[in-house]
Structures are given as C-alpha cells and as structure tokens.
Image: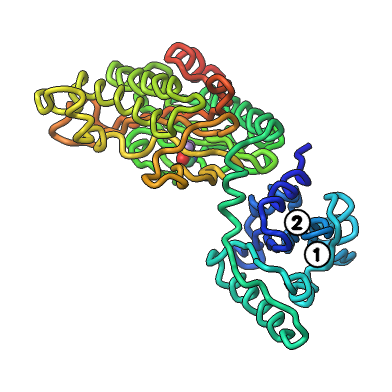
C-alpha cells in the first residue's frame, strides 16, 4: 500500500507556512459520438491521493503556527442514477475516509469554497500556465478573495508552479513503487516472450500486438503504457511507427516497443527478433553491437555517476562498431574519438539512450542539476528509475553497405538505481541471440 499521506505531508512541509496547493486530476475526454477515451487519472494527483475518479481536486493547506496542515478533497457526489449507468462513486464522505483526508466536499462546491481556503494564505501553488481553464479559475478565486479586502482579508501575494516540487519527489521511487514497477516489468517481459513465440513469417504486425495486449490484460495491467510499436522490416527504422498493419515476410526483423501500465506505473521494453527465428549475418552483427552498447550503458548506471554517462558509454560502443562494420565510411575519421566528436553515429542512432520512467513512460524530473550555475547532468541516486535503450536504424544510402539497409534494432530495458549499482526490472524479456532463436516461433 502506497503511503499517500506521507507524500502529502512531505509536500506540505515544503510549502511556506499557511500556503495552499491546488491539484486537479485529469479531465475525461470524448473520443467520438457518445464514446469516451478510457479514463486515466492525472499522475501527480494520483501520487498524492491514490484516487482514480475523474472530477476531483486536492487542496493542501500547509501548517501555520498551531494550525496543522490540512488535506481537502473535492470529488463527485454519490449519484444513484449515474452509478447505475457508470458504476460506483465514492462520494465525499467515503472518499475522505478511504483516503485518510481531513475534509471532503462535492466538486460542485469548489468555486464557492476556494476563496475561503485562500483567504489570508500567503502563497498559492498550482500547475501555473499549464491549462488556461485552471489559470482562469484561479484568477476568479483570487478576485473573489480580493473583493473582501475591506474586511482585512488578504489574497495570496504570489503564485508558484507546484509541479517542480512534485517532480523531484516523483523522481525517486520508494520501495512500494519499485515493487510495482518490477511487477509491470515482469508482465511486459512475458508479453514480449509471448509475441516472440507467436511469430512466424507471414504473421501480421497486429497479430503480434494482440499477443502483447492479451498478456498485459490477463495479468491485471489496466492499459498499455503507450501505443505499442510492432514494426517489421523497414518499418523498424520509423521511430514512432504504430500503424502495426504490415504482413511480415521471411527474413524480416521485428522491432516491438511495448510495455504495460500496472496500477498507474509504466514499463517500457523493446526487443528486436528475426520473424523466422534465425538472425542473418548482418542482422546478427548489428544486434550484437546494440547489445554490447546496452551492456556498456548498464555499467555506467550507479549512484553518483552523471545521468549523461550511460548515453556516452553507449555512443562510444556504437560508434566503434559502426566504424568496424563500415556503416561510417572507412577512413573518414582518424580515431573513434574524432568520430564521436563529430557525432558520426547520429544518422544511425538519433535518439537518447534513455529517460526517467515512472507513472509516466517519459517520467518527470530534471535531467540536470539546476542548482548549479552550469547546470551539469545530475548525479544518479538510489530510487531513480530509467530506461536503457540503444539502437541502430539503417536507412538506404549508397554510402552504407547494402546488406545493412532497412535494418532497425533497439533493445530497451528498465532499471532502478540501487545503493551499489542498479537493478534490471525487465529481465523476463528474452534478449540474447540464443534465447531469442530458441523461442521465436516456438508456440
Ligand atoms: N516507448 C517510448 C520510448 O521508448 O521512449
Ligand atoms: Mn523508452
Ligand atoms: Mn520504448
């Protein structure tokens, strides 16, 4: 059980005395006609409440003098008729009880109650300039407080962006979050293995996607964490390909980038395998190069190392391999250092080697140490979770040996930084050449 109350207390303790923080959850979104997109709560809101109902707002008032901090929820009221159509709603009283909050009110009372909650608060924290409707709502609340100035009431003198405080908290995952992310990684790894087993030349990309989704859902994951990429043949060189509608052919590689979201936490795995179960020579050469780059990147992930180090480690290995295999024109550079300095890898490797991972697949948190003047890459610390995802994508080009054309490979795992290194969360996804060749088509 996540300790949401502890998170609220830690956030409130960072606010000035008497300051107020306001955090709405995500709106529902219409897809078309009377159909809505599956509802997904706001990650920040969930982080502080564990509450997944739409139309909810959390208000935190920081302690001041002998007044303790307060956590107040606005949420949907009980509504027997709507609950007959749409399902259970807590209603304020049950929500207050279930979430361990101090007070709860119907969402319809938000605008009437906020001026009281903001009266005499020195500062207001919310997601400034992120959402025009919220900015306008905040302005109306402040105007309503100012209208009472003749009775001596003061309105917040300053508005602050709430999100950087939460970003820093979310960046370091606690033990409960790490356990959930491991479970998400295990399920996603099993899903990749399932897709590999179902592969054979002629299978459609969407059939493999269906295998992934089946494995996610049968294990209780609510959603894919992002739109699954199932890219065969030349499609693997399109980084955000997700049409997933091509029929595979003998000799193709299939690149699958897919991960489930489990109880609000993402996983993010990429595997690349030959649809017929045997890597060709050129495919295998590039695959083993990407694998070596990933190993070099892992070795750079430990507390105290800068975030930038694992990308640099991957780029070094990839660049050397590109020189050795002739992807980078032989003789163009005197040394691997020259090639790295010239970013010679970029035509074949145009993305970073990872990103923070958490409730959002590209999770929050600064990548640089913003407290220092030159803003260096920040040091890794225990509890930070990130992906490690080197790749190579070879588009047809006369300057590149033709045997490598249209090969796209990425290998992506999720890790969490530990006290003495890192832990891989996605080890159930087969990865070595031998494991993959033994599994593909072996349904
Ligand atoms: N699946 C998104 C990414 O790898 O960044
Ligand atoms: Mn990723
Ligand atoms: Mn990915």
User: Which is nearer the N-term, disc 1 or disc 2?
Assistant: 2
Measure the C-alpha gap from mark 1 to mark 2: 8 Å
Q: Is residue 119 above or below residue 180?
A: below
Which residue sits at x=55%, y=19%?
420
Q: Residue furthest left?
A: 331
Colouring method of the image:
rainbow
**Residue 428 vs residue 97: left or right?**
left
Q: What's the mark number on residue 53?
A: 2
**Residue 181 vs residue 67: left or right?**
left
- Residue placed most toward the observer, 20 or 51: 20
Residue 5 visible to an observer of this rendering: yes
Q: Which residue is mark 1?
A: 76
Q: How far across and how far down the image is residue 259, in percent?
A: 56, 36
**Residue 384 vs residue 16: left or right?**
left
Is there a contact, CB below 8 Å, between mark 1 and mark 2?
yes
- Residue placed most toward the observer, 51 or 20: 20
Q: How far across and how far down the image is residue 352, in percent?
A: 38, 37
Which residue sits at x=60%, y=31%?
383
Task: Report which quarter residue 408 is drawn in.
Answer: top left
Quadrant into which the C terminus falls: top right
Task: Report which quarter residue 143 is drawn in.
Answer: bottom right
Which residue sits at x=48%, y=28%?
304
Q: In terms of secondary structure, where does tag 2 sit?
A: loop
- Residue placed most toward the observer, 312 or 13: 13
Which residue sits at x=78%, y=85%?
151
Q: Is residue 443 above or below residue 172?
A: above
Q: In terms of secondary structure, where does tag 1 sit?
A: loop
Q: Residue furthest bottom?
A: 150
């Amino acid at each position: 059980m996540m300790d949401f109350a502890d998170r609220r207390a830690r956030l409130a303790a960072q606010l000035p005395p008497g300051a107020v923080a306001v955090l709405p959850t995500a709106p529902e979104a219409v897809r078309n006609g009377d159909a809505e997109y599956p509802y997904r709560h706001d990650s920040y809101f969930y982080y502080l409440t564990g509450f997944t109902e739409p139309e909810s707002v959390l208000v935190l008032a920081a302690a001041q003098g002998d007044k303790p901090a307060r956590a107040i929820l606005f949420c949907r009221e009980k509504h027997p008729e709507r609950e007959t159509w749409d399902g259970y709603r807590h209603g304020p009283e049950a929500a207050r009880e279930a979430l361990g909050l101090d007070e709860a009110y119907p969402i319809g009372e938000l605008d009437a109650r906020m001026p009281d909650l903001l009266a005499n608060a020195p500062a207001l924290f919310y997601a400034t300039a992120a959402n025009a409707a919220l900015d306008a709502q905040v302005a109306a609340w402040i105007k309503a407080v100012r209208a009472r100035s003749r009775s001596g009431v003061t309105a917040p003198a300053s508005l602050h962006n709430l999100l950087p405080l939460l970003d820093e908290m979310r960046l370091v995952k606690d033990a409960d979050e790490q356990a959930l992310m491991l479970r998400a990684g295990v399920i996603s790894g099993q899903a990749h293995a399932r897709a590999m087993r179902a592969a054979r030349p002629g299978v459609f990309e969407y059939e493999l996607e269906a295998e992934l989704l089946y494995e996610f859902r049968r294990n209780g994951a609510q959603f894919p964490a992002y739109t699954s990429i199932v890219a065969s043949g030349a499609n693997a060189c399109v980084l955000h390909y997700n049409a997933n509608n091509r029929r595979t052919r003998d000799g193709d590689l299939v690149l699958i980038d897919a991960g489930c979201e489990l109880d609000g936490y993402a996983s993010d795995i990429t595997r690349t395998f030959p649809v017929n179960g045997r890597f060709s020579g050129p495919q295998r050469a590039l695959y083993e190069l990407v694998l070596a780059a990933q190993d070099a990147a892992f070795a750079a992930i430990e507390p105290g190392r800068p975030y930038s180090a694992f990308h640099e480690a991957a780029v070094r290995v990839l660049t050397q391999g590109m020189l050795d295999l002739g992807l980078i024109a032989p003789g163009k550079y005197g040394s691997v250092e020259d090639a790295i300095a010239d970013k010679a890898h970029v035509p074949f490797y145009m993305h970073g080697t990872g990103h923070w991972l958490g409730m959002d697949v590209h999770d929050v948190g600064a990548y640089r140490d913003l407290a220092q003047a030159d803003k260096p890459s920040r040091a890794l610390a225990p509890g930070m979770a990130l992906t490690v995802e080197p790749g190579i994508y070879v588009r047809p080009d006369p300057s590149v040996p033709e045997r490598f054309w249209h090969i796209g490979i990425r290998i992506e795992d999720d890790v969490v930084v530990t006290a003495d290194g890192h832990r891989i969360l996605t080890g159930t996804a087969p990865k070595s050449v031998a494991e993959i060749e033994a599994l593909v088509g072996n349904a």
